[in-house]
Amino acid sequence: MTSRNSFFNLLKEDFRRRLWTFILSSLVFFGTFVIGFTMCLQNWVSQYGRWQLTEAEYLDRISADICYFLGMHPWFTLVAVVGAVICGVNGFAYLHSKKQMDFYHSLPVKRETIFAVRFVNGIMIYAIPYLVGLLYTFALSAVFGVMTSKVFYCGMFCFVLHLMGYIVMYLVSILAMLLTGKLVIAFFGIAVLTLYAPAVYGLVLTLCDSFFITLYSGSLDFEDALSMTRWFSPASYYYGLISALDQAEPKFWLEFLSFLLLAAVLTALSVWLYKKRPSEKADTAMSFKVTEPVIRVMIAVPVGILAGLLLFALQYDNGVDGALFWLIFGGLLGGFLAHAVIEALYKGDIRKCLSHKIQMLVTMVVSAVLPLCFFFDIFGYDSYLPEEKEIANMAVISSDMRFYGSYYKEDGWVSATNYALEEMKVTEFSAMYELATLLAEDANENRIEKFFGYNYTYQYVGGEEMVRNSEFIIRYTLKDGSEVIRSYEYNYYAVLDLLERIYEDEEVKTASHPIFSLAEAGWEPLCVACYSPLSPFSVQITGCEPLLKTYMSELMNLTFEELKNTAAIGELNVYFKVGNDSSYEDMATFLVYPSMTETIAMMKEHGYNLQSVQETDTIKSITVRYNGTINELKRALGMEVLETEQEIYINMNENSASWELYEEKGYLVMEEDYQEITIEFTDSAEIEAIKKGLVHSNYVGEFGPFPLRFGYFNAEVYFEVDSAEAVNGLIGWTDTFRFTKDGVPQFVIDRIFEELEAGTVSEN
Amino acid sequence: MIEAKNVSKSFSDILAVDNVSVTIREGSVFGMIGTNGAGKSTFLRMVAGVLRPDNGIITLDDMPVYENPTAKQEFFYISDDQYFFANTTPKELMRYYSVVYPKFDKERMKKMLRQFELDEKRKVATFSKGMKKQLSVICGICANTKYLFCDETFDGLDPVMRQAVKSIFAQEIEERGMTPVIASHNLRELEDICDHVGLLHRGGVLLSKDLEDMKVNIHKVQCAFKADSKIEEVLNNVDVIKKEIRGSLYTITARGNSDDIRNQIQTAGPIFLEMLPLSLEEIFISETEVAGYDIKKLIF
């Protein structure tokens, strides 16, 4: 048994052997604290000294900066990770040397003691210079009169956190050294142990994202991914620790306890492996034969899948057969190559790369088949529809009925879509469920077509009426508390009735417009800025509660029919306080519709005359643009296209998949010229006629809800005001507008066709 | 006493040591002979507790060796390619070993370093191969352990140094009963130092005997006869291992009592008869031939 005295003597001796790592660590922390911190502190003192701050504010700001420097700065994380790898590899490199194994393991010292000595020294090499540097920062802060309890607490807290992160990474490096017998393989081992879980999780997400057509992209959250894999990855564990810096104290203690558990498990595992590890494994690739196939398969299968995915992505445009072939081939090839490379590394001989042929075949087959399971959705992900009785509440968001902007919630900023998804908890959901059933059935029946985007091009075949594909996000909150979100693509026109039933529900209205939730949460609006894209200036209104109250009342009364047929004409930008921090403000945007007469009147009372484009008389010219082919426009307008049953005219810019689809269906594909038509209208009568059908581009498409529009033409409108009405000398400006669905005057269409007639048609 | 009972060790599918049973008595010099790959180093690494035997057990003074610091305090192991810390000096080694080996004699080490003209402050990395071997032996001697395991330690030493080391061994054996265990592929190196020799071949022990026992039973006779001598008839009564004839000169290696062999040959009326000393090599040739091996193929 090693006495305590002997243990410390061994520690001392081992420390001498590893002096260079200690010197390196000391230099890094010297540079960080003595040079870096001193310079920063000088800057902060000088900068804040010039500001008009109270003593408390001055100390508060400098303490915050010091705390950021001591903990949040990514440099400390980098030092801990790189330092842990260096110390782990350097401290246990003797495991990879036969000479050193003979030496150390013939000494009258127990293996646990050798391990403990090396392990403890590895921690000291990091901790001592860090602690000394930290004491220096405290001393220097005291000299500058900025040493507060917050600085002390923060410095020590960060020290403990980074030390924890370091120890975990250090143990992982030691594990990699124990499991391998060659340095190069050990580095691979460290990479695998550190990144494998997040990498595999990322691969699964990629598979889901690639093949599940109803996957809601908003749910692919990086932090969620990390939190799920943290117990399998020191990298994500460390990330979690650093995140804890922002958390309340109980969270830290939870982290601390979890660290103790993790460190204890890793240490016990390392000691156990150390004792089990045969000394003769120095200079062999892997220390334990039993791990060889496990690790090989664990690496080779994901590599094979990734290779298949890459080739699949490259050949995606070639349609289902071509892409599937490459998905399978890539999986087989990737699995084979990964198996061969790893086996060659294991054996240290390229000629042995084809060893374990059965395992190789299994790897290849799994690499090829697993992505197919996702492709053909054998898990039933896309056809998922819970029983109505299982659902507690639902939410439905359509890309054509969602609002824009970001809004502040308790835990940060969320998009209007996520805001609505979280707020909408409709318990009378029969219309929603009806829609969900329709969408799920459609997704299930047309999976492959939707996956390859055939639905988009197929809409014109046989002169079908125009289709407008919209995204529908559906959230089910089940009675067991779980949440399921699906995203579907479906023809918006086909479900207008259902959408109307859904929107007329007050719960949906309340959740769709964040102003209601903000008001309910007790926001404190400071002022409102009125804005219209027709005017280059805005008016700011303080004491805005009556205006907002009126606006909310009119918003609640806004019908689906009005939203469907009219676009917003302006907006109210409301500034309000966020949280308890008096210095932080948020701005939320709410749209004003022509039917909100009382709101518009109140805005006018405050000096802002909100007009629609139809009401304005400052338009000097309108330029209408069309980019497309003649037959494309004819189809869009429901006009007859001179196609026989065997002929189809398609845009040159269409992807090859649609060409193949038409050809498979027996069409003779005719290639059409893609044209860009631009016509300027300056006649006042024509302008009057055109402006009736215009809506501002800000309030359609991705930036606003509902209005049915004719998406093929753009209108660039030139406004000009008298010099007396000029704002900041500006008398003329151009803005982009869209047409409503039936809002394009016939003379505009005729002029466009006239220009298109000059276009050419050629056989493919 | 070191005792290995049915010890085996494999590396992957290579059987390095196969069911070896050997006893190494205290106070004698144990020589372990074998070709490269015979299993000497593997066996010695198991005895030193570096490797764990797959089968069997190795005890040192009735204590299992593997992972037993108490047993390990009783020996010092010099591997065939001894490890020295990077940038270390003999002085630093002395400090390290004195931490690890409780009975390490620093004064003695200083004295021996002077005797061998090794500078205690010079970097070991700058030493020649022979100097490193000397340093290893000095460390081993000064550790004051009961056993000293040397794997090919004499390889690389010049004859003078070899002799000096042998003298030190003899002195240590004499003064404190140290038991050196020496593994070598060279019989001639062990000839004048070993008391007991074990021959390893293909992982197994071909023979393990006291040198004296072997010498007592094997003799070499050089004699000359007239042409009509009945020597061939006489030799039928002698356990001849080897016979060389050059004209009338016979060189006979035979097993048995020395006087019996001489008396038998005398009956054939030799013109000249002389008993010659046997080298270790010749003894081994004889012994292994009995076991059905051609020693020249095994060792030389």
Image (cartoon, coloured by chain):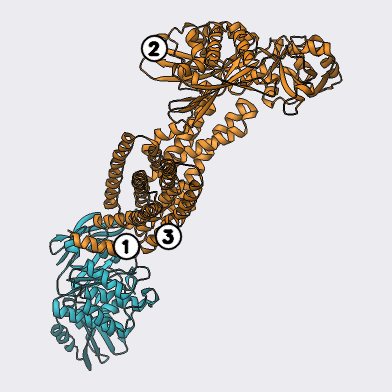
Chain colours: A orange, B cyan
Residue for badge 3: A27
Count up the numbered dots.
3
Q: Residue at x 60, y 30 (%)?
A: A323
Q: In the rendered image of this protein, does residue B285 appear above or below residue A125? A: below
Q: Tell me if label 3 and label 2 are in contact, CB under 8 Å.
A: no
Marks 3 and 1, how far apart at CA: 17 Å
Q: In the rendered image of this protein, does residue A628 appear above or below residue A283? A: above
Question: What subunit carries mark 1?
Answer: A
Q: Residues within 10 Å of mark 1 (few under 14, many from 20)?
A: many
Q: Residues within 10 Å of mark 3 (few under 14, many from 20)?
A: some
Whether residue A368 sits left or right of residue A535 in the image: it is left
Residue sitting nearer the eye, A128 or A568:
A568
Residue sitting nearer the eye, B190 or A210:
A210
Query: In the drawing, what numbered circle is on residue A15?
Result: 1
The answer to whether residue B237 shows anywhere in this view is: no
Q: Residue at x 72, y 28 (%)?
A: A728
**Mark 2 or 1, which is nearer the eye?**
1
Residue sitting nearer the eye, A63 or A332:
A63
Indicate the position of residue A43 as horizontal and vertical percent values: 49, 51
Residue for badge 2: A390
